[in-house]
Image (tube, rainbow, N blue to C red):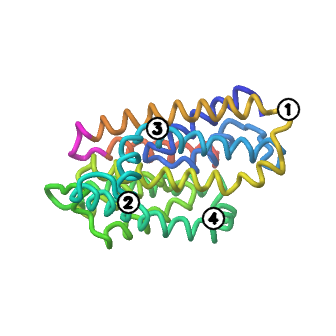
């Protein structure tokens, strides 16, 4: 893997993991479209992916550090009783929403990626992802609720939506935002909850591979791998900041631009791959 490929893959991870446009779909499509001969069995490839995920998770934890600090203190019973109760409830909602994807991801992720991991299928599901985003804006309830209004059942539903992202082309952040919107949340609250539950999922996926990382080592590619991780972290932080600001200012058809992008990218990718 060259430095330029590492740079592009890191930027791709940092942007597409947070934007509702499917990081896994782009990870499958971009090397195929650019005719990159990236050997996924190469010794440096696994460490590279692990560090990209850990960099993204670190960026999310850093951006929402105040939220996580308050949640941690509340878990220990520190703070006003009413605030502690509310924050413990939010922490519980995060755990509930994280549970389905963690279980299914552990059990079936490799099989699903092998089954649906072709560029053609990733491009097709990118079109489906756009349709889901577009439909959610038309099916969501009028008005909008706050994250404090989310029920335990609602958190579980958002978690089940997140499982769809095991298929390349379906966005994790998009699926969870759609779940939140259909349950009546404002865009800002749906995005915040999506990013809060992203940190343990993305970080956990990276940490799960750490034993393999230690056994493989990074060899002579150490500098490239850590460069990619830092690039992914910076890009992910900037993406999160942009999206939170965007959803704070747009609460009407805010997912439509991402739907249009998915349709354009999916259509052009299919045309390129089939011609």
In the rendering, at what x and y percent does residue 82 appear? 21, 58
* Range covered by the magenta-colored residues: 248-254
Residue with the most extreme top position: 4
For image coordinates 75% across by 47% down, the residue present is 46
Alpha-carbon neighbours of circle 1 within 10 Å: few (<14), some, or many (≥20)? Answer: few
Are discs 2 and 1 less than 8 Å apart at CB? no
**In this figure, which residue is indicated by the disc labeled 4?**
109
Give the CA separation, mark 4 to mark 2: 25 Å
Residue 253 falls inside the magenta stretch = yes
> What SS does tag 2 mark?
helix
- Observer-side mark, 3 or 1, equals 3
For image coordinates 23% across by 59% down, the residue present is 81
Alpha-carbon neighbours of circle 2 within 10 Å: few (<14), some, or many (≥20)? Answer: some
- Observer-side mark, 4 or 2, equals 2
> What SS does tag 1 mark?
helix
Numbered circle sitting on residue 95:
none
| Secondary structure that dominates the magenta span | loop
Are discs 4 and 1 less than 8 Å apart at CB? no
Alpha-carbon neighbours of circle 3 within 10 Å: few (<14), some, or many (≥20)? Answer: some
Is 184 positioned to the left or the right of 275 in the image? left
User: If you read the primary sequence from the N terminus, does the residue marked by circle 4 or circle 2 appear first?
Assistant: 2
Alpha-carbon neighbours of circle 4 within 10 Å: few (<14), some, or many (≥20)? Answer: some
Q: 212 or 116, which lies in front?
A: 212
**In this figure, which residue is indicated by the disc labeled 1?**
220
Give the CA separation, mark 4 to mark 1: 29 Å
User: If you read the primary sequence from the N terminus, does the residue marked by circle 2 or circle 3 appear first?
Assistant: 3
Give the CA separation, mark 2 to mark 1: 41 Å
In the rendering, at what x and y percent does residue 156 appear? 38, 70
**In this figure, which residue is indicated by the disc labeled 3?**
62
Residue 136 falls inside the magenta stretch = no
């Amino acid at each position: 893997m060259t430095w330029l490929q590492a740079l592009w893959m890191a930027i791709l991870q940092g942007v597409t993991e947070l934007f509702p446009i499917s990081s896994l779909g782009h990870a499958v499509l971009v090397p195929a479209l650019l005719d990159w001969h990236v050997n996924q069995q190469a010794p440096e490839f696994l460490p590279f992916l692990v560090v990209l995920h850990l960099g993204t998770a670190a960026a999310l934890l850093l951006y929402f550090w105040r939220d996580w600090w308050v949640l941690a203190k509340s878990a220990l019973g520190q703070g006003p009783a009413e605030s502690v109760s509310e924050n413990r409830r939010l922490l519980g909602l995060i755990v509930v929403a994280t549970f389905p994807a963690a279980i299914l991801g552990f059990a079936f992720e490799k099989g699903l990626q092998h089954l649906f991991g072709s560029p053609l299928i990733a491009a097709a599901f990118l079109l489906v992802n756009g349709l889901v985003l577009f439909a959610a804006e038309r099916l969501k309830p009028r008005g909008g609720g706050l994250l404090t209004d989310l029920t335990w059942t609602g958190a579980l539903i958002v978690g089940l939506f997140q499982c769809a992202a095991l298929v390349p082309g379906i966005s994790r952040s998009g699926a969870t935002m759609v779940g939140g919107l259909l349950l009546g949340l404002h865009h800002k609250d749906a995005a915040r909850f999506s990013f809060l539950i992203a940190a343990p999922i993305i970080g956990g996926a990276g940490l799960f591979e750490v034993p393999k990382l230690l056994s493989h080592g990074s060899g002579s590619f150490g500098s490239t791998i850590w460069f990619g991780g830092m690039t992914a972290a910076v890009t992910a932080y900037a993406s999160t900041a942009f999206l939170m600001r965007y959803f704070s200012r747009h609460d009407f058809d805010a997912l439509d631009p991402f739907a249009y992008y998915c349709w354009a990218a999916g259509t052009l990718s299919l045309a390129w791959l089939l011609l």
